[in-house]
Amino acid sequence: MAWDFETDPAFQKDLDWVEAFIKAEVLPLDHVLGSPYDVADPKRNALVRPLQAKVKARNLWGCHLGPELGGQGYGQVKLALLNEIIGRSAYGPTVFGCQAPDSGNAEILAHYGTPAQKTQYLQPLLDNEIVSCFAMTEPQGGADPGVFTTTATRTSDGWRIDGEKWFASNARYAAFFIVMVVTNAELPLAKRCSMFIVPAGTPGLSIVRNAGYGDHTDSHAYLRFENVRVAKDAMLGDEGGGFLVSQVRLGGGRIHHAMRTIAHAKAAFDAMCERVLSRRTKGEVLADKQTVQEKIAESWIQIEQFRLLVLRTAWLIDKHQDYKKVLKDIAAVKVAMPKVLHDVAGRALHLHGSIGLSREMPFAQQVIDSYFLGLADGPTEVHLVTVAKQVLRGYKPTNELFPSYHLPRVVAQARELYPD
Ligand SMILES: Cc1cc2nc3c(=O)[nH]c(=O)nc-3n(C[C@H](O)[C@H](O)[C@H](O)COP(=O)(O)OP(=O)(O)OC[C@H]3O[C@@H](n4cnc5c(N)ncnc54)[C@H](O)[C@@H]3O)c2cc1C
């Protein structure tokens, strides 16, 4: 089949509808409501539920999921095309039923939950009647799971969890927590941790405080587990299988953030273009100045390069249906993502002058958000190492004194092949 960058016309119609819907009905929610995750807020529900019903009626609900979980089974490429529109609004993912971290947590429950857990947590989560929290990072470190000290120890009828977790998003709204804890500190790291589901309100589980960042209304909790008792079946997956379970969510989680990042970068870019065509200085619009044109061009190129990398990675995920085969590509997307938003939002901020830096514009928050993208789901440095290791697997060293591509050797080989 030929390479094809065209979107199938039927799906393009859906995308056109989504674009108009997000602009007219969803984006305004960002300015009148609090957190999209506050499912107990009646004002939020009064506005969000009818919009979710419209999305369901158009068969666009839960597009990250297969039909067995009430999704559309569209695959990652279509999801990418959708997310790069709905990501413009903080409420977009919630209105379309694909918001993080619930999307990944649902995938974990679908894979590893018992039938009872699926009834109690998965279905209401998929319906956005409840929201969830994923707690892995600890105050003493997130990038290195080797420093995790929160433990689960066996009791006569289940497990007892003790320790602390840090920066657990949406904990204050969550009906349950998926928590990574050490079950055997003596084992090698890969086998040391297990994953548990802990219902909110379990005695001994408390929020020490909620940290925020920038202007966001969402919160990231410092959690404490003190003698928290859970039943035997609270373990998701096998004992020692915590990392395996976490992989179910992290691969998807990273690429979905990237899809939404295109939306944020594009919003900053659109604003930048309008501004430079409108603002006059020294007798001409900013757009006529070459140093401004450079910023426009660099931003467009960065967004397009990133978008192609994301779409190609989405296509590879659809093709292989196995995140392990797309590790390098997902890590590359993760590395590229913060820089694109940082650079484009930074240029938008700068070209708007003082108003660009002010709270009356979103750019300063977007620049801060770019740092979030470089940290959440692991810092950039760790993913750079993954890319390099995976890339180098495709090469081998030479045992010769000079490189295999050393020109004297290459020329000698060429003359041997074509002596005349
Ligand atoms: C907005 C936001 C939401 C989050 N939500 C969640 C959540 O819901 N659940 C959850 O469990 N966690 C969450 N996190 C935490 C996130 O996963 C961690 O911030 C991340 O794993 C880094 O851990 P850390 O913050 O402890 O930084 P550290 O591990 O202390 O790392 C700090 C810095 O050290 C450097 N560094 C670390 N390791 C290496 C290395 N191997 N090589 C070179 N340099 C290195 C990097 O510059 C890194 O940024 C969230 C973070 C943010 C910012």
Image: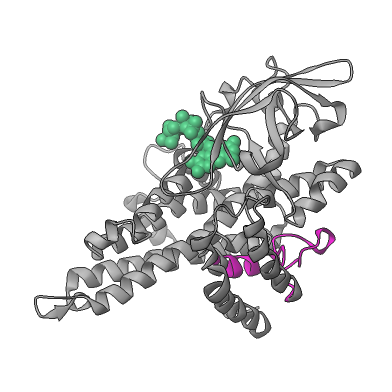
Residue 179 in the image: state x and y as whole percent: 69, 32
> Taking 124 as reference, is 89 left or right?
left
Residue under the point 63% across and 59% down: 43
Residue farthest front in this picture: 42
Q: Is residue 259 left or right of residue 288?
A: right
Q: Position of residue 150 (x, y in %)?
A: 65, 21
* Point 32% across, 70% down: residue: 272
Asked if residue 262 is positioned above or below residue 34 in the image, the reply reads below
Answer above or below: position of 312 versus 180. Answer: below
**Left-right relation of 161 to 67:** left
216, 381: nearer the viewer: 216
* Residue 112 highlighted magenta (yes or no): no
Instruction: Give yes or no for residue 64 being in the magenta stretch.
Output: yes
Q: According to the image, what is the colour scheme of the structure?
A: one colour
Task: Please state the horizontal and vertical placement of residue 331, each as a whole percent of the image.
Answer: 53, 48
Residue 396 visible, this angle = no
Give the camera-side residue of 44 and 53: 44
Residue stretch in magenta? 58-84
- In depth, the one of 418 and 25 nearer the eye is 25
Residue at horizontal 80 percent and vertical 45 percent from the top: 121
